[in-house]
Image: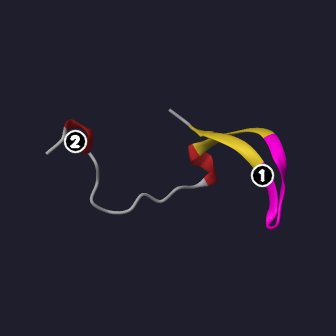
Amino acid sequence: DSPSMEGLEKKERRWTLNDFEIGKPLGRGKFGNVYLAREKK
């Protein structure tokens, strides 16, 4: 086992909008607006 695998759950991570800090708008895409975002700590 590599150290990076410690503490990871077997099940798939379910991301929600609440998991991210939304930043500045980057532009418009085919499916809507695109924003800069980063994972909350």
Dominant SS in magenta: strand
- Residue at 52% across, 56% down: 15
Amino acid type, residue under disc 1 in the picture: Val
Q: Answer left or right for 18 relative to 10.
A: right
* Relative image position of residue 6 (x, y in whole percent): 22, 42
Q: What element carries label 2?
A: loop
Specify the farthest residue to the top.
41
Quadrant housing residue 11: bottom left
Q: Is mark 1 on a helix, strand or loop?
A: strand
Which numbered marker is on residue 6?
2
Distance between the Cα atoms at labels 2 and 1? 33 Å
The verdict on residue 38 being magenta is no
Q: Answer left or right for 15 relative to 29.
A: left
The verdict on residue 33 being magenta is yes
- Residue at 27% across, 60% down: 10
Q: Do the residues labelled 2 and 1 touch (CB within 8 Å)?
A: no
Which numbered marker is on residue 10?
none
How crowded pointer 1 is (Cα within 10 Å; few <14, some 14-19, many 20+) is rated as some
Q: In this picture, is 31 found above or below 2?
A: below
* Relative image position of residue 31 (x, y in whole percent): 79, 67
Amino acid type, residue under disc 2 in the picture: Glu
* Relative image position of residue 12 (x, y in whole percent): 38, 62
- Residue at 24% across, 45% down: 5
Dot 1 corresponds to which residue? 34
Magenta segment boundaries in residue numbering: 25-34
